[in-house]
Image: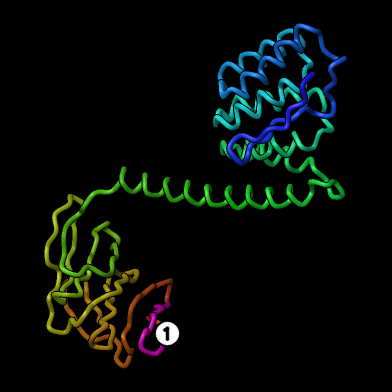
Amino acid sequence: MKKIFITLGLTLLLGVSAAGSALAYSTEGAMYYNEGLDLYERGEYGKAIESFKSAVAKDPDFVDAYYNMGSLFEYLKSYQSAIACYTKINQLDPDDMEVVLKLAELYHKVGNTERALFYVTKIKEGDDLYSRATSLKNQIVVASQREAAKSSLTNINTANSTNRSVVDKFSGPTGLAIDSRGILYVASYTDNSIYKIMPNGQSQLFSKSPLLGGPIGLAFDSMDNLYVANYAKNNILKITKAGKVYTFMNNITNPYYLIIKGNNMYITEQGNNTVVRYKLY
């Protein structure tokens, strides 16, 4: 049988495996095999593959034919076909770690992380290929993490595009809060106003008091009094249900957000890089 040691391009190597032997195969199988090698040398890769297929049809255990056919499929970027060839070799010779590593590489190329890790972890410490296998394993894990992050972002974006709708338009909208009746309130930093959006979708001006100056954070207490982080005026305003506005707290440098939990109001004081807690009652 002809021994082949040829490169395709600069990266692909076809060779006769150690398990192969001319005496192990039928005359007809060997004839198709050698025909495949000749066709390959003439650059007729498709016909070469057909000859290797004929060789394995005559001799189903023809490892060398599977190997060279798999190498050609890989070169032609028919990765699934290459995987099928190398999988057959792995079944015939499970201890061939070169083939195991090749399967890991191919599954990584087609994006099948689970199968890639299955094969690459078969190569144990002490094996000559362990260093290459470890490097490949790291690549697979990193790629898997990137794909997971990308998939998560895609799902978020898809949900946003599917469920998103514009409630209304405001000038410089900042804080949001909902009262006990389900009415949404929106702070408008640019025009120093507070708007409310009714459950039916209609919006109306709630307050445009001269006390308002760069409102940002909004929060309701249990009695539906609205508190406003008045960023530009360094204070907290309180607006009653009836719409009466008065200064609730002074000397808060650039208040940003508000949260009310039980009897406590928490304020982020951006100007002093602090969080302030205040007992309401």
Q: Nearer the viewer, residue 5 or 69?
A: 5
Report the magenta stretch's main SS: strand
Residue 64, picture quadrant: top right
Tag 1 residue: 276
Q: Position of residue 81 (x, y in %)?
A: 60, 24
Q: Nearer the viewer, residue 25 or 229?
A: 25
Q: Residue at x 12, y 83 (%)?
A: 210
Can residue 88 be spotted in the picture? yes
The correct choice, above or below, for 273 with respect to 2 in the image is below
Q: Nearer the viewer, residue 15 or 111?
A: 15
Q: Position of residue 129 (x, y in %)?
A: 79, 46
Q: Amino acid at mark 1?
A: Val
175 relative position to 91: left or right: left
150 relative position to 240: left or right: right
140 relative position to 122: left or right: left
Q: Residue at x 21, y 80 (%)?
A: 214
Quarter occupied by the N terminus? top right
Q: Position of residue 185 (x, y in %)?
A: 23, 65
Give the residues drawn in magenta, as a range: 264-273
Q: Nearer the viewer, residue 162 or 64?
A: 64
